[in-house]
C-alpha cells in the first residue's frame, strides 16, 4: 500500500526563531499579510514580535483578532471580508490551534471559493492551493501550525467538524519556544495533553506507517518527560523546547496517520459545550485507550514503554494498564484529570454527541469500530 506524507517545506524552530521570519517572507516577495489571531495575544503585546519583523522588511499587515477558542464558520467569513477589504495577498496565523485553523479556512476559501463547510464532506477536496499561509505557533499542543487538519464549529447546529485538505500545509511554520514561555499553566497542560493524544492516536491508527510510528513514539517520550516541568516552571527553556519538538513530532504523525475516537468525541464536546479541546482529550484518552487496547495490545505496550513504564516483568495486560495509568497520572499532575459532569456535560446530550462522533472523519482510522452504545458508554464512563 502506498502512502503520502505532508509537512511544511520550511519550519523555523527553536528560541527566537521568529527573528528569521521577516527575511524568509521578503525573499518570497509577499506584500501584505492578514494576521489571524485573538484579542488576548494582541492585548498582551505578543503579536508585536511578529509585526516588528514585518515592518522591518517592508511588509504591510492588517490584524483580524476575532478568533474564538473553538473557531467558528463566522470567524472564517469575517476574516475573508477583511482580507478582501485590506487587499492582503497572504495570511499569517499567530497563536495556537484556533488561530491556525481559522487562518487555514480563510486561506483555502479565498483561493477556492464557496464555504468552508463545502470542504468537510471528504478529504483533499480543494482544487487549488490556498492563499500563501504562514503559521506562527505560540502553544505546544495542537500542531495545527503544520498539519492538514482544521477543526471548525458550526454554531447553528452545535457541531464541530474537521476539514482535511493537503492544501492546508503552510509555506512556512514557526515554532519559537520563547513565544511559549508566558503560556499560563492550564493552557500549557491542556495543549500538552492534546499533543500526547495526537501521538497515541496516530500510533494506533489504521493508517500508521513506519514514519508516523517513529514520530509518534518519540513525541510520547518527550511529552511524558517534560510536560509536568513545563506546566510548573514555564521559564524552563529545556522543557519548553522539548515540548515544542514533541508537539511537532506528534503533528507529523497524526497529520499523516490521522486520529481516532478521542478526537471525534472531543470535537462534539467542543461543539455542544464549547469546552477546551485539550482538556476533553485528556479526560477521554484513558477510556478510549482501554477500548482500543483490545485489538492493538502490542501497540499499547509500546506506548507504556514510551511513557516510561518498566514492562520487563509485566504481562501484556499489566503493561497496557500501567501505560494507561501513567497517562492518567500525568493528567492528574498537570490538572487535566477532571470529569465531564463537572464541566456541565449532561446525560441527555450523550446520544446526540455519540452519533456525531461516529460520523466524524477522525473515527475512520480508529483501530476498533464501536457501536453507538459503546461510544455513549465511553462518554458515560468519563462523567
Image: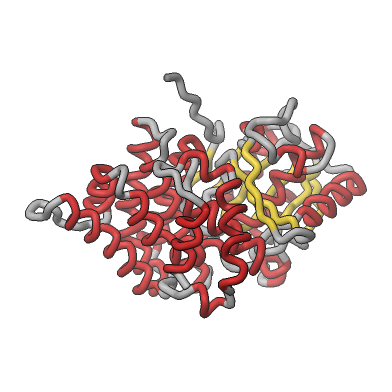
* Residue ranking furthest to the left: 313
Residue 290 horizontal/vertical position (percent): 33, 56
* Residue ranking furthest to the top: 1
- Quadrant holding the N terminus: top left
Q: How is the image coloured?
A: secondary structure
So how many labels did they put on this image?
A: 0
* Residue at the spot 55% in from the left edge and 31% down from the top edge: 9
Residue 228 horizontal/vertical position (percent): 35, 68
* Residue ranking furthest to the bottom: 342
Answer yes or no: is residue 242 visible: yes
* 56 in relation to 212, above or below: below
Q: Nearer the viewer, residue 175 or 344?
A: 344
* Residue at the spot 45% in from the left edge and 54% down from the top edge: 195
* Residue ranking furthest to the right: 85
- 151 left or right of 147? right
Q: Nearer the viewer, residue 161 or 13?
A: 161
- 47 left or right of 15? right
Q: Nearer the viewer, residue 170 or 373?
A: 373
* Residue at the spot 32% in from the left edge and 45% down from the top edge: 218
- 95 left or right of 240? right
Name the image quarter holding residue 65.
bottom right
Residue 172 horizontal/vertical position (percent): 60, 39
Answer yes or no: is residue 202 visible: no
* Residue at the spot 34% in from the left edge and 31% down from the top edge: 210
Name the image quarter holding residue 59.
top right
* 248 in relation to 233, above or below: above
Residue 120 horizontal/vertical position (percent): 69, 40
Amino acid at each position: 500500500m502506498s502512502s503520502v506524507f505532508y509537512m511544511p517545506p520550511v519550519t523555523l524552530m527553536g528560541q527566537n526563531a521568529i527573528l528569521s521570519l521577516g527575511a524568509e517572507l521578503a525573499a518570497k516577495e509577499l506584500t501584505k499579510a492578514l494576521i489571524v489571531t485573538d484579542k488576548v495575544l494582541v492585548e498582551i503585546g505578543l503579536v508585536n514580535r511578529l509585526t516588528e519583523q514585518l515592518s522591518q522588511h517592508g511588509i504591510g499587515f492588517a490584524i483580524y483578532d476575532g478568533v474564538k477558542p473553538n473557531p467558528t464558520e463566522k470567524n472564517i467569513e469575517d476574516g475573508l471580508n477583511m482580507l478582501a477589504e485590506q487587499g492582503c495577498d497572504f495570511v499569517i496565523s499567530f497563536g495556537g490551534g484556533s488561530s491556525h485553523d481559522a487562518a487555514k479556512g480563510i486561506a483555502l476559501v479565498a483561493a477556492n471559493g464557496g464555504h468552508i463547510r463545502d470542504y468537510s464532506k471528504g478529504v483533499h477536496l480543494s482544487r487549488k492551493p490556498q492563499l500563501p499561509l504562514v503559521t506562527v505557533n505560540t502553544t505546544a499542543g495542537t500542531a495545527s501550525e503544520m498539519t492538514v487538519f482544521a477543526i471548525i464549529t458550526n454554531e447553528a447546529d452545535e457541531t464541530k467538524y474537521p476539514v482535511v485538505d493537503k492544501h492546508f500545509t503552510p509555506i512556512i511554520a514557526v515554532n519559537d519556544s520563547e513565544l511559549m514561555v508566558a503560556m499560563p499553566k492550564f493552557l500549557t497542560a491542556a495543549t500538552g495533553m492534546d499533543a500526547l493524544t495526537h501521538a497515541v492516536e496516530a500510533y494506533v491508527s489504521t493508517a500508521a506507517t513506519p514514519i508516523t510510528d517513529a514520530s509518534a513514539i518519540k513525541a510520547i517520550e518527550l511529552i511524558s518527560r517534560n510536560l509536568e516541568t513545563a506546566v510548573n516552571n514555564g521559564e524552563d527553556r529545556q522543557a519548553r523546547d522539548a515540548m515544542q519538538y514533541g508537539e511537532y513530532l506528534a503533528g507529523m504523525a497524526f497529520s499523516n496517520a490521522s486520529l481516532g475516537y478521542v478526537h471525534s468525541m472531543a470535537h462534539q464536546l467542543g461543539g455542544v459545550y464549547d469546552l477546551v479541546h485539550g482538556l476533553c482529550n485528556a479526560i477521554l484518552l484513558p477510556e478510549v485507550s482501554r477500548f482500543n487496547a483490545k485489538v492493538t495490545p502490542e501497540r499499547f505496550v509500546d506506548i507504556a514503554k514510551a511513557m516510561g513504564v518498566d514492562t520487563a516483568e509485566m504481562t501484556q495486560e499489566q503493561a497496557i494498564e500501567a501505560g494507561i495509568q501513567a497517562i492518567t497520572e500525568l493528567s492528574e499532575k498537570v490538572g487535566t484529570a477532571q470529569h465531564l459532569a463537572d464541566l456541565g456535560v449532561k446525560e441527555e446530550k450523550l446520544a446526540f454527541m455519540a452519533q456525531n462522533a461516529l460520523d466524524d472523519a477522525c473515527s475512520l482510522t480508529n483501530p476498533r469500530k464501536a457501536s453507538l452504545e459503546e461510544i455513549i458508554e465511553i462518554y458515560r464512563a468519563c462523567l
